Amino acid sequence: MLHKFHKISALIIGSFVLVHLINHLCILSGTQQHIDFMEAFRVIYRNPVAEIVLLICVLFQVCSGIYFVWRRRGQRSGFLEKAQAISGLYLAYFFLNHVGAVLFGRYIAELDTNIYYGIAGFYTAPFHLYFIPYYFLAVVAIFIHIASAFYWLSRNSITDPMRTKLTYSIIIIGVLISATLMLGFNGVFNEIIIPPEYLELYE
């Protein structure tokens, strides 16, 4: 039953993450395109019901995921099983930290938690040394976790060689997307000027 709820929760969070990643890829066209997409998307997820459901799912996913990792400690073998556990633990850290940062930005700092809030750390030394790998690994961890789940769930439907190829293809795609996003967040494709009120958070 716990596994079933974990999957349902993962689907809800995954739907949000998918749109969130598409939103982030808008940075390749500029910050205004990113903000325009975000504001359209906020109509859906910024209502109280959706936010509460999403927060509950995140908390449940983190707690159940940590429980699963602890319960199978020392029993995992092979790269994918270990990668699934490590990526899951990293995502638990990332989600808790990320949600906390968003809530801080909205209610304490009283800032719009848009792309400028998310990447201001990229433009302030030495914080960029933390935030670049922090975000890069988060996106990669998402794809590793998806790939590991795919590998397990597809075991009875496709051949092992094809299953392995598709699994590692998902991971490679994730690494490429994450690297592209990091370049975009660092202003490689379009100039990004962070408003001073966001940079002041790191002073």
Image: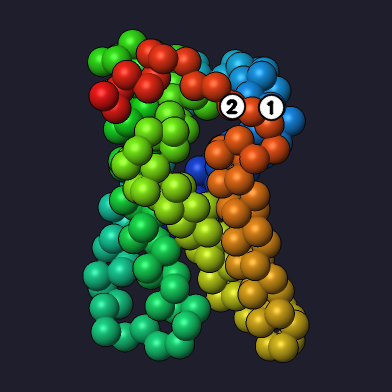
Classify the position of the N terminus by image quarter: bottom left
Residue 45, above or below 163: above
As measured in the structure, the alpha-carbon distance from the residue carrying label 1 to the one carrying label 2 is: 8 Å
The residue at the point 26 percent across, 73 percent down is 71
Q: Between residues 120 and 69, which one lies in front from this camera angle?
A: 120
The numbered disc on residue 30 is 1
User: Which residue is located at x 32 percent, y 56 percent?
Assistant: 64
Q: Amino acid at mark 1?
A: Gly
Q: Is residue 97 left or right of residue 162?
A: left
Q: Secondary structure at mark 1?
A: loop
> Quadrant location of residue 184?
top right
- Residue 192 is tagged as 2
Q: Position of residue 197 (x, y in %)?
A: 38, 13
Q: In terms of depth relative to the viewer, which is nearer, 95 or 191?
A: 191
In the rendered image, the vertical position of residue 7 relative to residue 116, given as above or below: below
Helix, strand, or loop for circle 2? Answer: loop
Residue 17 in the image: above or below residue 70 = above
Lower sequence index among marks 1 and 2 = 1
Foreground of the two, 86 or 196: 196
Is residue 82 rendered to the left or right of residue 10? left
User: Which label belongs to residue 54?
Assistant: none
Dot 2 alpha-carbon crowd within 10 angstroms: few under 14, some 14 to 19, many 20 or more: some
The residue depicted at 39 percent of the width and 19 percent of the height is 198
Identify which amino acid the numbered label 2 is placed on. Ile
Q: Classify 10 Å Cα crowding around label 1: few (below 14), some (14-19), many (20 and above).
A: some
Q: Residue furthest front?
A: 125
Image coordinates for residue 79, horizontal then vertical, percent? 47, 83
> Is residue 110 in sight in this rendering?
yes
Q: Please identify the quarter of the rendering in which residue 78 is found.
A: bottom left
Residue 97, image x, y percentages: 31, 41
104 versus 18 height, above or below: above
